[in-house]
Structures are given as structure tokens and as C-alpha cells.
């Protein structure tokens, strides 16, 4: 039930607030899946209605910068994020709802820093 | 003699004024105080508020308008929130994206601030703002709200709404909303705020739609500032500085 509520919340939050200049739409995220990705933060803009994260990721496809969307600043703040929590150059692990298309990117459900902070 | 009469009158006036003030204070105190920060009721089963109950009684012509809207925006995943536009009534009070709301209560006016998009409602209880003639009203997403007390229940009536097909609780400009707010307690004795909302809109629905929304008193009582247009403004400034147009930037 908790999982259902959380998933419902994610979807509702995403539908309620898509970034103004978004390149990706909420409908493109597959909230039925959670994928872990790790990398180095290049840009992080924690904002409303959504957070923008660009991360350098290395995997089988090579090393590249990938842009993600995430929760609103207000939501992420209530989950424990603070202005000094993550900055460019930090290595972090994120859990995302991937793009349905299979392309790079997704909706960030949670971030974990190497120091163990999670929000 | 004259001085004595004047003094007596002044004393009488002072006593009368004091009595009036005490009486007014007592009247205000007679009503429940809804002031404070309220957040979605976690035990309610639905994190983001109750599902809109009006779909089954929506008229075909209204449904066609709603479907045309969704056909337009759904493929792009667009929404008012994505453009930093608030939900509007009654969606703001029924859901507001799961964010908290703050109630500021004065005898003559109750102000509700929904954190998401800082949507604002003013509910006029008395004074000239509580009786603005229809000819002086213009439609908005939140409408024009007046209220009165029925015992411990605050009754709020809202009109002057814009037609909205961009929220789950779609409605015409002729919609009328009545909310009835009262305090309650959960099984653990924690304070709840409960509102029964009825929307009557013969243009869009074959019957009035009634729903109940419950809020918990916020434990930290903290509302966060919700700016939303700032990133778009900053992007626009970046485009100006770099000689780009916003359209070209969006098409990247």
C-alpha cells in the first residue's frame, strides 16, 4: 500500500508540475520502473516546479552527460535536501523512473550522496 | 455641571465601547480557529486528495471539451502547473499537489494560501468586500468567495469562476461551489480540518458533485516559499545575454 501511495504521489507530482521549458513530458516517464544510475554531477538546479540535474554517466554506451528531472524544490527540501547537500563535481547515485522511449534521461525519484545523505 | 455631564457621557461611552469590544471578541472567540498550517491527511488513503467524483455525471458536451483539451496537451505532457499556473477551484482545495496550505483567520476575512504556486483565496465574511455586486466581479480561477458561520461550521460560497477544462474538476463559468469546514479529531486525538465541498454546475454536470477533503494539522507548521517562474526568467535572461531567442532555446 505504501509503495502504491508513493508511486501515485510521484505520478501526481509529475503530472501536476512539468518544467516550463521541459524537453521531456511527464507521460514519457515509466513510473513502473526504478533504475539506479551513478555519476558525477555537472549541473544541479533545485527549483519549482521541478529540479534539473545533469550528470556525467559512464556505462556500456560510453561516457556522456545526461539530463534528468526531479521533484520540486519544496518536495525535495521536505525529504531532507539542503542547499549544500549536492554540488557540481559530487559523485551521487540516483534512482530514476526511466524514459519510456529507452533514451537517456528520466525522472529522479531519489538521490544519495557518497556521504550517505538520501533525499 | 456641564463638565460632570460630559464626564459621565464619556464614561458611559467608554463602558459601551468596552462592552462592544468585549462582545466582538467573545463573538470571534465563539468560532473555531482554523488558523495555522494544514497538510494532506495521510491516513485518508489518497496522498493527493480524493479522486474527482464528477466524471459519471458530466454532460456529453462538457466531456467533449475536456477530451479536446486532453487531446491537445497530453501528448506533450503539459499542464497548468508546468506553466506555473495554479490549479484553481475546486482543485486547489481538493488536492493542490499534496502541498500544505496556510489559513489566516480574521473576524472579517479568512485567507487561504496553498503552497503550490502560492495560490491565494480570500473568503470575505463581513464588510464591503463580502457583498460585491455581481456586476463588479470578473471571473478568475479561484473565483469570489464569501463565508458565514453556522455554529462551528464555516460555510463558504464561491462564484465568478472561469470556465476550466484544465483541472480534474472541470467546470463552466456558471459553477457554484459550497464548502463546509469544521474541526474534528482522529482516533489518536489529533486535530483534523474537514471540508465537504459541493459543486453545482448545470452547464457541465447533470447533478451536484459532493466530495470530502481532510487535512492534518501540520506538525512543523512550516510553509515553504514556492517560486516557479524564476527558472524560466533566468533562462530568458541567459538567452538575452547570449543573443538567442526563447523559441530557438526551446527547440534545442
Image (tube, rainbow, N blue to C red):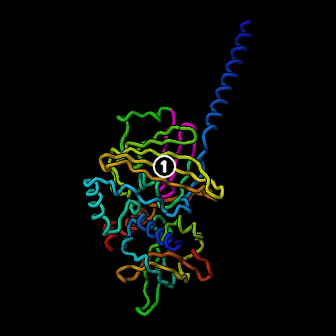
Question: Could you tell me which quadrant the C terminus of chain A lies in?
Answer: bottom right
Instruction: Find residue A56 and report its horizontal and vertical position in percent.
Output: 47, 84
Mark 1 neighbour density, 10 Å: few (under 14) some (14–19) many (20 or more): some
Residue at image mark 1: B196
Check if residue A98 falls in the magenta segment: no
Residue that extends furthest to the top in the rendered view of this protein: B1
**In the rendered image, is residue B194 in sight?**
yes
| Above or below for B32 versus A61 | above
Disc 1 on helix, strand or loop? strand
Q: Quadrant of residue B70?
A: bottom left
Front residue of B163/A18: it is B163
Question: Residue drawn at (60%, 57%), measured in percent from left and top?
Answer: B218
Main SS, magenta region, reads strand
Instruction: Find residue A112 and report its horizontal and vertical position in percent.
Output: 57, 79
- Count of number-bearing discs: 1
Instruction: Find residue A104 and report its horizontal and vertical position in percent.
Output: 39, 82
| Above or below for A61 versus B75 | below
| Residues rendered magenta in the picture | B104-126
Question: Residue drawn at (34%, 66%), measured in percent from left and top?
Answer: B246
Q: Quadrant of residue B14?
A: top right
Q: Is residue B99 left or right of residue B82?
A: right
**In the rendered image, is residue B229 in sight?**
no
Chain letter of disc 1 in the image: B
| Above or below for A35 versus B132 | below
Amino acid at each position: 500500500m505504501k509503495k502504491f501511495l508513493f508511486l501515485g504521489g510521484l505520478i501526481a507530482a509529475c503530472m501536476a508540475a512539468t518544467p516550463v521549458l521541459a524537453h521531456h513530458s511527464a507521460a514519457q516517464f515509466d513510473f513502473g520502473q526504478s533504475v539506479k544510475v551513478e555519476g558525477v554531477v555537472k549541473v544541479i538546479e533545485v527549483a519549482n516546479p521541478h529540479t534539473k540535474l545533469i550528470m556525467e554517466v559512464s556505462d556500456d554506451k560510453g561516457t556522456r552527460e545526461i539530463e534528468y528531472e526531479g521533484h520540486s524544490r519544496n518536495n525535495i527540501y521536505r525529504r531532507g535536501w539542503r542547499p549544500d547537500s549536492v554540488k557540481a563535481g559530487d559523485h551521487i547515485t540516483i534512482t530514476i523512473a526511466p524514459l519510456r522511449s529507452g533514451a537517456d534521461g528520466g525522472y529522479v525519484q531519489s538521490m544519495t550522496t557518497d556521504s550517505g545523505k538520501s533525499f | 455641571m456641564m463638565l460632570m455631564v460630559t464626564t459621565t457621557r464619556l464614561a458611559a461611552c467608554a463602558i459601551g465601547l468596552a462592552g462592544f469590544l468585549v462582545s466582538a471578541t467573545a463573538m470571534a472567540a465563539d468560532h473555531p480557529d482554523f488558523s495555522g498550517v494544514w497538510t494532506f491527511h495521510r491516513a485518508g488513503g489518497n496522498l493527493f486528495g480524493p479522486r474527482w467524483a464528477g466524471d459519471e455525471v458530466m454532460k456529453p458536451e462538457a466531456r467533449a471539451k475536456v477530451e479536446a483539451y486532453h487531446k491537445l496537451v497530453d501528448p506533450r505532457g503539459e499542464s497548468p502547473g508546468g506553466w506555473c499556473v495554479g490549479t484553481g477551484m475546486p482543485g486547489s482545495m481538493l488536492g493542490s499537489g499534496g502541498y500544505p496550505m496556510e489559513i489566516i483567520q480574521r473576524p472579517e476575512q479568512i485567507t487561504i494560501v496553498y503552497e503550490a504556486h502560492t495560490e491565494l483565496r480570500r473568503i470575505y465574511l463581513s464588510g464591503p468586500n463580502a457583498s460585491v455586486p455581481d456586476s463588479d466581479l470578473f471571473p478568475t480561477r479561484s473565483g469570489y468567495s464569501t463565508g458565514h458561520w453556522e455554529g462551528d461550521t464555516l460555510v463558504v460560497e464561491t462564484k465568478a469562476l472561469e470556465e476550466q477544462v484544465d483541472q480534474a474538476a472541470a467546470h463552466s463559468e456558471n459553477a457554484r461551489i459550497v464548502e463546509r469546514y469544521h474541526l474534528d479529531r482522529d482516533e489518536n486525538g489529533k486535530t483534523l480540518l474537514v471540508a465537504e465541498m459541493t459543486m453545482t454546475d448545470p452547464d457541465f454536470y447533470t447533478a451536484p458533485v459532493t466530495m470530502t477533503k481532510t487535512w492534518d494539522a501540520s506538525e512543523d507548521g512550516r510553509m515553504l516559499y514556492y517560486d516557479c517562474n524564476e527558472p524560466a526568467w533566468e533562462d530568458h535572461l541567459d538567452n538575452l545575454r547570449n543573443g538567442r531567442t526563447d523559441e530557438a532555446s526551446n527547440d534545442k
